[in-house]
Image: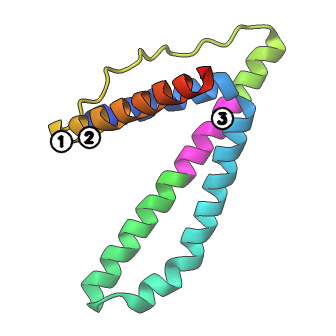
């Protein structure tokens, strides 16, 4: 299930980047910067609320790892934009890796039953409203 969700997230990220382009990247960059600022601001409270030395150290390591990851993601996106701008200026077409659309995520049986009932109820109400409109 986790693999299917991550495959869909990767595909959706690429689809949004291709179809929305610069606005999508701008929103992501702003979000990353705000999240990094938030991580830095919450470091003192992480230290203050830690339970013992091991808890404080673990919290600091996790916070640092997340911050490093976000900085790396921000840097990756910045370098990618710079390379795309240079390619466009040189007249070279930008080629992106094509990620095929993943298979649908199988729902647990109970969720599928509930979704089926909701779908049938919506269809029934639509038919009833269409009949009322015809009368």
Instruction: Please tell me in which quadrant of the rendered image residue 31 appears.
Output: bottom right
Quarter of the figure with the C terminus: top right
| Highlighted magenta segment, given as a residue range | 71-81
Whether residue 73 appears in magenta in the rendering, the answer is yes
In-image side of 57 versus 30 (left or right): left
Q: Is residue 43 left or right of residue 107?
A: right
Q: Quadrant of the N terminus?
A: top left
Quarter occupied by residue 57: bottom left
Q: Earlier in the sequence, mark 2 or mark 3?
A: 3
The x, y position of residue 52, in whole percent, is 27, 91
Mark drawn on residue 110: 1
Side of 24 relative to 90 (left or right): left
Q: Which residue in the protein does label 2 denote?
A: 114
Percent position of residue 38, x then y: 59, 70
| Residue drawn at 34 percent across, 83 percent down | 56
Residue 62 percent coordinates (x, y): 37, 67
Element type at mark 1: helix
């Amino acid at each position: 299930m986790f693999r299917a969700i991550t495959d869909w997230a990767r595909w959706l990220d690429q689809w949004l980047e291709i179809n929305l382009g610069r606005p999508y990247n701008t929103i992501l960059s702003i979000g990353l910067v705000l999240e990094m600022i938030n991580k830095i601001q919450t470091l003192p409270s992480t230290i203050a609320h830690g339970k013992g030395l091991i808890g404080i150290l673990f919290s600091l390591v996790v916070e640092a790892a997340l911050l490093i990851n976000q900085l790396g993601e921000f840097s990756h996106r910045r370098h990618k934009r710079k390379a795309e701008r240079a390619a466009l200026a040189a007249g070279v077409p930008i080629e992106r890796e094509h990620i095929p659309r993943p298979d649908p995520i199988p729902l647990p049986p109970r969720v599928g039953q509930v979704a089926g009932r909701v779908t049938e109820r919506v269809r029934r109400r639509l038919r009833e409203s269409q009949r009322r409109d015809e009368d």
